Each structure stands twice: as structure tokens, then as C-alpha cells.
Image (cartoon, rainbow, N blue to C red):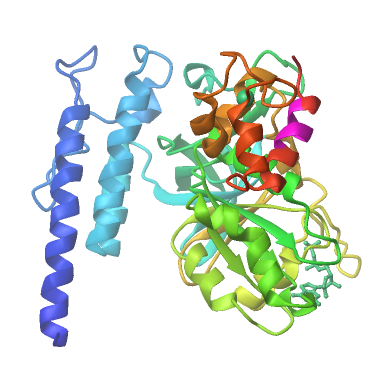
């Protein structure tokens, strides 16, 4: 393809996506107007998706669901413009939501402050007092990963004016009001599960636990097995992970030491927001530093020389990748655990066990003790890897009945 042809092809692809986004924006539109008569109507590049948007004056009086609907439209609108790749238009559009703001991404949160990245620079922002989390069902207004609209005064102080609709949410019980949930990370697409082949020894049960968490939170899991330079023979390494590939999971073998597999890892991280999971010492920091030189993972550490530190932050930090995409580092990944899962539900998270279970003698078979269990039979016949059944049993016993 010549340059020109490629450009046209890309343009057509983009146009297709944009057509479907426009449709969704239309669908999102409320059938009749409420309350205010002075909604803004804007026409830019033939797009009128930002009509009727004004966060600054309407925060508390919106009918239920209204704000989410508006945010969804603003988000789609911004996304559209980003795709059109016209920086000036992005600024123009975000200015219409009454906030004279710019779009940015929240990369750190601490109490009532957050750090927002706007293109090349970042700004510590307060939250507009009228913003409320009430309607979202969560206890916090902003979380790491949120896309926001901010305003900035002449002194360079930033204020978050609006939080755009979230694609996804990782939440945990709120520290003080445990019946409510707190958003820990927003807009995550995938879970990068990092394990090491040796030092520490590969731990399949933990991989399974993360895979279950990924299913619960609708994240795309990617398994990365690091330190393959320590493998006695690569075949046993591949054979151990083969069941996961068989289930359709992407498995990447890497060595941060030799650089093996790092290219594949880069591709997997590109243009997506990934949350990192894995034991300490498996090589997460080393890998990320190889993917992007200069990227320093460790959170919650104070720089002793400058005295500057991150001790004020909740321990979640989002790192942007130059190639596009983000990596979220949170030691709290454990907390998105399986606490709410019951024993009887576990098999649903093992697709191959769930498929076999229909042939078990007992309808409520736990696939551990029962006679006539099709799952145990499959293990004996080598159709189901014993390793998967082993970790199933271990996790089963760790769950509430
Ligand atoms: P993290 O705690 O998961 O971030 O792990 P680190 O990146 O700090 O790595 C822990 C230790 O493993 C360090 O001593 C690294 O040098 C070492 N390490 C990391 N990746 C590899 C690898 O691919 N091969 C080997 N042999 N060592 C590695
Ligand atoms: Zn069974």
C-alpha cells in the first residue's frame, strides 16, 4: 500500500468506528429535555454530541442516571475527537461543558487531591466541591485511571470539574463504610499476571486465583512467566503452562535478564490499561523497566535524597507508556480477591471443570469427594490437567461454604 492509500484506508476504518460511536451518542440522548432551558448546543465537524452538557451548574439536581448518561456522551465525544487527531478541537470541545477545561487522566489520588496528566505535563488538582459520588454508588469521586475534565487558573492551580463515564471499575469495600464500595482503579482493560518460573518457584494456584479475579472483574487476563533464563529446559516450562493456552489465555514467556519475550509483552501492553498482579520478586519492576526504560514501578517509597515521596498517596499509581497504554501498579491487587466467592460458585470460574460437571452423578457435586464425578474421572484419564484440579481443590477449601 502506498502512503496515500494507507492513509485513506485508515481514514475509512476510523470513519466506520466513528459512525458507530455517533449512533451510540444518539441512542444515549435523552428523549426530552429536563429543567434547564439554556443547554449548550454545539456543532463541530458536524457533531452535535455535546449539546445539553453542563456539569458546573447541574451536579446535584440531575435526575437519577442523568449524569452518567451525559458523561457517557462526553466521553464518546472526546474519544471521537481524539481519533480525529485534532488537538485544537479537543480543547475547544472540552471547553463547552461549562468548565473551560481540558481532558486528562488521573494518575494518583490522595485524600482530596489528585494528580492529573494532560498530555506531556501533570497537575495536582483539587475536586470541584459540587462533585458528588452519590449517584455512582461508590464512596469516592475520583480514582486512578479516571478520565476527567479539569480547569486551571492563572496561578496554575487545577480543579477537577467532571469525571467522565467509566469503562470498568475495580472496587473494594470502603475502609470506613464497609457496606459501600470504593473505586480503586477505573478504566482498566486487562490484568497482567506476572509469575516467575523459578525464584520464586512458579505457583499455579495463584495464577488460577488471579484468573478468577479477572473473570469476576471482566478484565482480559494475560499470563507472563518471567525468568525463563532460569529454566532447566524450556519444554517443561511450556508444558506446565500449556493448559492455560489450551483454555485460550495468552501466555508470554519472558526474561527481563536476556530480553527474551519482552517484545511480545510490549505488544500485549500497547494501547491498553493493564493492572499488574504477581508476587513480589517475580520481576515486575525489571520487566516494566525493559518495556520502557526509566519506568520505575515501586510505589509507596520515599526518595531519601530529595525527601520527596509518595507517602501521601494511596498506593495506586498509573504509569503511562510512551507507546500508548498504561500500567497500573497496586500492591492491593490481592484485595480484589475472591472473598465474596462461595465454594459452590468456584467451578463456574474453571471453564473446563464447569463443562465436565454436567456429567457428574450428583447435581451439587463439589468434584472432590463424590463418587461418579466426571471431573475426577477426567483427571484420572489425563483429560484434565491434575494441576488445575489441585488448585481448584485448594481454592475450594479456602472459600466459605
Ligand atoms: P518485583 O518485586 O516483581 O518488581 O521484582 P523485581 O523486578 O524487583 O525483581 C526481583 C529480582 O529478580 C531482582 O533481583 C531482579 O534482578 C531479578 N530478576 C528479574 N527478572 C529476572 C529475570 O528475567 N531473570 C532473572 N534471572 N532474574 C530476574
Ligand atoms: Zn463432579
Query: In the image, what residue occupies the spot 11% across and 64% down?
Result: 12
| The N terminus: image quadrant | bottom left
Q: Residue furthest bottom?
A: 2
| The C terminus: image quadrant | top right
Say which of 390 and 88 sits in front. Answer: 390
Q: Residue furthest left?
A: 46
Q: Is residue 336 visible?
A: yes
Q: Is residue 249 visible?
A: no
Query: In the image, what residue occupies the spot 91% across and 65% down?
Result: 304
Q: In this image, 186 relative to 100: left or right?
A: right
Magenta-highlighted residues: 392-396
- Residue 110, compared with residue 183, is above or below; it is below
Q: Position of residue 184 (x, y in %)?
A: 63, 36
Q: Position of residue 135 (x, y in %)?
A: 47, 17
Say which of 192 and 401 sits in front. Answer: 401
Say which of 268 and 119 sits in front. Answer: 268
Query: Ligand 1, what quadrant?
Result: bottom right
Q: In this image, 389 relative to 11: left or right?
A: right
Q: Position of residue 29 (x, y in %)?
A: 19, 26
Corner quadrant of residue 21: top left
Q: Position of residue 240 (x, y in %)?
A: 68, 60
> Across the whole image, how many numbered discs are drawn on residues?
0
Query: In the image, what residue occupies the spot 84% across and 57% down?
Result: 301
Amino acid at each position: 500500500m502506498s502512503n496515500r492509500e494507507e492513509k485513506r484506508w485508515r481514514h475509512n476504518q476510523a470513519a466506520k468506528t466513528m459512525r458507530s460511536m455517533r449512533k451510540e451518542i444518539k441512542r444515549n440522548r435523552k428523549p426530552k429535555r429536563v429543567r434547564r432551558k439554556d443547554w449548550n448546543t454545539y456543532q463541530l465537524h458536524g457533531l452535535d454530541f455535546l449539546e445539553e452538557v453542563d456539569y458546573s451548574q447541574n451536579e446535584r439536581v440531575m435526575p437519577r442516571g442523568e449524569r452518567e448518561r451525559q458523561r457517557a456522551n462526553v466521553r464518546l465525544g472526546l474519544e471521537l475527537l481524539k481519533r480525529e487527531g485534532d488537538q485544537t478541537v479537543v480543547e475547544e470541545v472540552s471547553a463547552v461543558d461549562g468548565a473551560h477545561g481540558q481532558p486528562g487522566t488521573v494518575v494518583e489520588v490522595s485524600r482530596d487531591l489528585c494528580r492529573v496528566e494532560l498530555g506531556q505535563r501533570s497537575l495536582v488538582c483539587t475536586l470541584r466541591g459540587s462533585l458528588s459520588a452519590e449517584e455512582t454508588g461508590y464512596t469516592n469521586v475520583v480514582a486512578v485511571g479516571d478520565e476527567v475534565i479539569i480547569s486551571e487558573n492563572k496561578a496554575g492551580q487545577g480543579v477537577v470539574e467532571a469525571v467522565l463515564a467509566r469503562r470498568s471499575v475495580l472496587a473494594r469495600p470502603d475502609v470506613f463504610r464497609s457496606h459501600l464500595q470504593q473505586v480503586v482503579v477505573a478504566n482498566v482493560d486487562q490484568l497482567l499476571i506476572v509469575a516467575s518460573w523459578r525464584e520464586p518457584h512458579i505457583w499455579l494456584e495463584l495464577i488460577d486465583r488471579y484468573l478468577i479475579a479477572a473473570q469476576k472483574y471482566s478484565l482480559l487476563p494475560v499470563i507472563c512467566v518471567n525468568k525463563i533464563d532460569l529454566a532447566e529446559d524450556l519444554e517443561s516450562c511450556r508444558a506446565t503452562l500449556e493448559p492455560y493456552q489450551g483454555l485460550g489465555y495468552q501466555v508470554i514467556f519472558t526474561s527481563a535478564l536476556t530480553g527474551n519475550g519482552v517484545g511480545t509483552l510490549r505488544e500485549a501492553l500497547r494501547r491498553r490499561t493493564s493492572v499488574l498482579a504477581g508476587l513480589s520478586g517475580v520481576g515486575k519492576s525489571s520487566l516494566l523497566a525493559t518495556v520502557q526504560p526509566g519506568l520505575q514501578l515501586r510505589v509507596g517509597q520515599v526518595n531519601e535524597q530529595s525527601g520527596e515521596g509518595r507517602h501521601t498517596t494511596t498506593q495506586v499509581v498509573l504509569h503511562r507508556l510512551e507507546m500508548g497504554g498504561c500500567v497500573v501498579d497496586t500492591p492491593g491487587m490481592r484485595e480484589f480477591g475472591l472473598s465474596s466467592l462461595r465454594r459452590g460458585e468456584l467451578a463456574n470460574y474453571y471453564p473446563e471443570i464447569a463443562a465436565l460437571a454436567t456429567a457428574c452423578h450428583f447435581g451439587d457435586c463439589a468434584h472432590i469427594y463424590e463418587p461418579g464425578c466426571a471431573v475426577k474421572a477426567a483427571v484420572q484419564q489425563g483429560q484434565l490437567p491434575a494441576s488445575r484440579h489441585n488448585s481448584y481443590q485448594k481454592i475450594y477449601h479456602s472459600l466459605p461454604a
